[in-house]
């Protein structure tokens, strides 16, 4: 029995810990780093690719994107930038659903990724066959899926949303009297349900990184830093979300760090974001939210194993060889684009405030 939706049989789609890959961060000397970065810049000058990177990727990849006319952002804005860029090749540094979204929106463009094995536990935990069957059992419901899903799942959906847009979209659907199927993140779904009061059937997936943040240990850390504001990504468990000063997308978390009148911040999201936070708010202090209970050990320790697969060496290889091109079945892509385009049109009509987060 599903606790969130009594009467509904839904199995647990969270990834077993022993199937989560280890987070391996590339170790390079300063000389190796400088040499690889110089090669990337040279290769980008010779060809026309544009780098689009997520905030969780290696700091050098983010710096390269910023310094070469590319873009660093959250999943919604990465999609928007890629769509509006005139470049015929995009190199997406992030996880596969981000590359697929770029391809779906721009079938004529070449989309390359440093590593095609860069997956996401939410995507893995929402296989199309089971999800499609679930949707078929509830034909009266509007199907809303998070960006962190495969092209096939998006093709089965009416709407795609991101963490920065979910509350606004569900509020609007609730106002139209719609009942919702939500997938795949159960924590984000629960948060959105509480914020909107919408009637939502919630798929039981989770992000292996955010699920590790611990409520009790966060309470103890807050006691040590009573002045600190708590910034939380909504893929985190409810016990963590309920202690937040701001619950928001990655972009919203960075904006909050810049704008809030506090010096210290406890941050519950992937630690890759600290690079941009420190760059945008250099005088502030950022503290990692706890990922493990007393004497327990975390698996990813607040760094996504798949985001870490985006390395400088692999980026050079892809730019030199043109390998690792993302392919999406054209018919699947055509149907998935409808759900994605709905979100882009919705967020455009609401203006940029939607990017400031949900809290
Ligand atoms: P954002 O859209 O907030 O960047 O989140 C993407 C993601 O994968 C978070 O884990
Ligand atoms: Fe997926 Fe979590 Fe990694 Fe984001 S941090 S890409 S949700 S596994």
Image: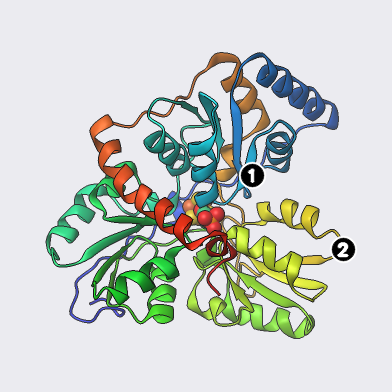
Image quadrant holding the C terminus, namely bottom right
Using the image as rendered, state which of residue 225 and residue 165 is in the foreground.
165
Using the image as rendered, state which of residue 117 and residue 264 is in the foreground.
264
What is the x, y in percent for residue 229? 72, 77
Image quadrant holding the N terminus, namely bottom left
**Contact flag, marks 1 and 2 (Cβ < 8 Å):** no
Left or right of 69 in this view: 89 = left
**Residue 259: image tag:** none
What is the x, y in percent for residue 126? 31, 53
What residue occupies the far right of the structure in this picture?
283
What is the x, y in percent for residue 117? 46, 35
Q: Mark 2 points at which residue?
A: 283
Report the Cα–Cα distance between label 1 and label 2. Answer: 21 Å
Would residue 146 be visible to someone looking at this image? no
Please tell me which residue is depicted at 41% across the width and 32% down the height of the picture.
106
Name which of mark 1 and mark 2 comes first in the sequence.
1
Would residue 80 be visible to someone looking at this image? yes
Please tell me which residue is depicted at 38% across the width and 60% down the height of the picture.
14
User: Judging from the image, what secondary structure is the residue with disc 1 in?
Assistant: strand
Q: How are the colours assigned in the image?
A: rainbow
Please tell me which residue is depicted at 57% across the width and 22% down the height of the picture.
318
Using the image as rendered, state which of residue 211 and residue 97 is in the foreground.
97
Please tell me which residue is depicted at 23% across the width and 34% down the height of the picture.
331
Left or right of 337 in this view: 228 = right
Q: Judge whether 251 appears above or below 89 on screen.
A: below
Crowding at dot 2, Cα within 10 Å, few <14 / some 14-19 / many 20+, comes out as: few
Left or right of 164 in this view: 292 = right
Q: Judge whether 267 appears above or below 91 on screen.
A: below
Q: Name the residue under label 1.
A: 72
Q: Judge whether 288 appears above or below 175 on screen.
A: above
């Amino acid at each position: 029995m599903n606790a969130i939706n009594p009467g509904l049989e839904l199995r647990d789609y969270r990834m077993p810990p022993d199937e989560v890959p280890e987070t391996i961060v590339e170790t390079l000397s300063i000389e190796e780093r400088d040499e690889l970065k110089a090669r990337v810049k040279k290769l980008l000058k010779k060809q026309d690719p544009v780098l689009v990177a997520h905030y969780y990727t290696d700091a050098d990849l983010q710096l390269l994107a910023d310094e070469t006319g590319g873009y660093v952002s959250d999943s919604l804005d990465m999609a928007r930038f890629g769509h509006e860029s005139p470049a015929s090749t995009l190199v997406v540094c992030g996880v596969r659903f981000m590359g697929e979204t770029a391809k779906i929106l721009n079938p004529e463009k070449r989309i390359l990724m440093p590593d095609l094995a860069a997956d996401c536990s939410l995507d893995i935990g929402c296989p199309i066959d089971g999800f499609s069957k679930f949707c078929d059992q509830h034909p009266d419901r509007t199907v809303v899926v998070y960006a962190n899903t495969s092209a096939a799942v998006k093709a089965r959906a009416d709407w795609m949303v991101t963490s920065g847009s979910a509350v606004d979209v569900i509020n609007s659907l609730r106002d139209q009297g719609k009942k919702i199927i939500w997938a795949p993140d159960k924590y984000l779904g629960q948060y959105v349900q509480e914020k909107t009061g919408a009637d939502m059937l919630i798929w039981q997936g989770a992000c292996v990184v955010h699920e590790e943040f611990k409520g009790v240990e966060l309470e103890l850390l807050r006691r040590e830093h009573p002045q600190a504001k708590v910034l939380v990504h909504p893929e985190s468990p409810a016990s963590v979300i309920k202690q937040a000063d701001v619950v928001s997308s990655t972009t919203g978390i960075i904006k909050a760090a810049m704008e809030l009148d506090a010096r210290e911040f406890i941050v519950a999201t992937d630690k890759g974001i600290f690079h941009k936070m420190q760059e945008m708010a250099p005088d502030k202090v950022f503290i990692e939210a706890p990922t493990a209970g007393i004497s327990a050990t975390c698996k990813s320790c607040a760094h996504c194993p798949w985001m870490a697969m985006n390395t400088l060496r692999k980026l050079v290889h892809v730019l030199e060889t043109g390998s690792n091109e993302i392919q999406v079945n054209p018919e699947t892509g055509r149907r998935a684009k409808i759900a994605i385009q709905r979100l882009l049109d919705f967020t455009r009509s609401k203006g940029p405030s939607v990017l400031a987060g949900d809290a």
